[in-house]
């Protein structure tokens, strides 16, 4: 049961924390973002895409975490899917810092830095460890 709890915590991070962070003053409410990030004045395309991806992965993680398997093999398969859907967003967030010119925090907010790294590692770990415990 601890594994499912960890996967649920991971799912809540995907469903809520990522959206709350992206809707804040450093992202969607930041008037200094370039036009490509703000495709339309009322629609911030990249953030909307990221939030949508996070919510979809969170729902998929919850679905496979709590889906009742008919066989032990299906249980392992569901937990593998949960590990993937529950960790891929966080792994991608960690990998993003490796691209040239990227930063985890803009200078106007105290950067350079990568303050989201511990959250990405923690929630990604919840997904991977939770899945492993349930398998």
Image (cartoon, rainbow, N blue to C red):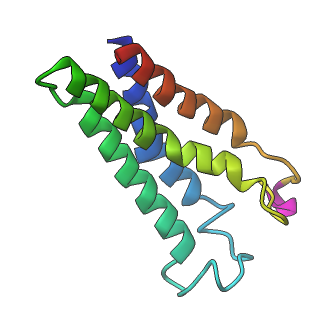
User: What secondary structure is the magenta-colored segment mainly?
Assistant: helix
Image location of residue 103, percent across then percent down: 81, 58
Query: Residue 106: x, y in percent?
Result: 81, 61
Return the residue nearer the eye: 102 or 112. 102
As drawn, is 83 to the left or to the right of 94?
left
- Residue 99 placement: quadrant: bottom right
Task: Please tell me which residue lies in front, 36 or 94.
Answer: 94
What is the residue that sits farthest to the left in this orientation? 70
Does the magenta run of residues contain 57?
no
Give the x, y percent position of residue 53. Answer: 43, 58
Q: Is residue 113 left or right of residue 96?
A: right
- Left/right placement of residue 10 relative to residue 1 reads right
Residue positioned 60% across, 29% down in the render: 122
Front residue of 16 and 61? 61
Q: Quadrant of the C terminus?
A: top left
Quarter of the image for the N terminus: give it.
top left
Snapshot quadrant of residue 47:
bottom right
Question: What residue sits 41% from the left and 43% below the top?
Answer: 85
Q: Decide: is 4 above or below 1.
A: below
Query: What segment is highlighted magenta in the picture?
Result: 105-109
Q: Is residue 103 above or below residue 78?
A: below
At a point 56% along the width and 85% down the height, the residue shown is 39
Residue 44's quadrant in the figure?
bottom right
**Residue 106 highlighted magenta (yes or no):** yes
Residue 127 sits above or below residue 104 on the image: above
Residue 48 percent coordinates (x, y): 48, 68
- Tell me how many marks there are: 0
Residue 62 against residue 25 in the figure, above or below: above
Query: What residue is shown at x 44% (from left), y 40% (from top)?
Result: 84
| Direction from residue 14 to residue 121 in the image, left or right | right
Q: Residue furthest front?
A: 73
């Amino acid at each position: 049961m601890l594994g499912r709890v960890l996967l649920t915590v991971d799912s809540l991070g995907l469903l809520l924390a990522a959206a709350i962070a992206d809707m804040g003053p450093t992202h969607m409410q930041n008037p200094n973002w370039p036009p490509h990030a703000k495709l339309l004045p009322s629609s911030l395309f990249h953030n909307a895409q990221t939030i949508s991806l996070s919510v979809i992965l969170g729902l998929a993680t919850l679905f496979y975490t709590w889906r009742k398997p008919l066989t032990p093999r299906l249980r392992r398969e569901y937990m593998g899917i949960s590990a993937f859907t529950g960790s891929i967003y966080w792994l991608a967030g960690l990998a993003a810092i490796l691209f040239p010119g990227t930063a985890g925090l803009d200078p106007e907010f105290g950067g350079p830095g990568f303050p989201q790294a511990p959250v990405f590692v923690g929630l990604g770990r919840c997904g991977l460890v939770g899945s492993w415990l349930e398998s």
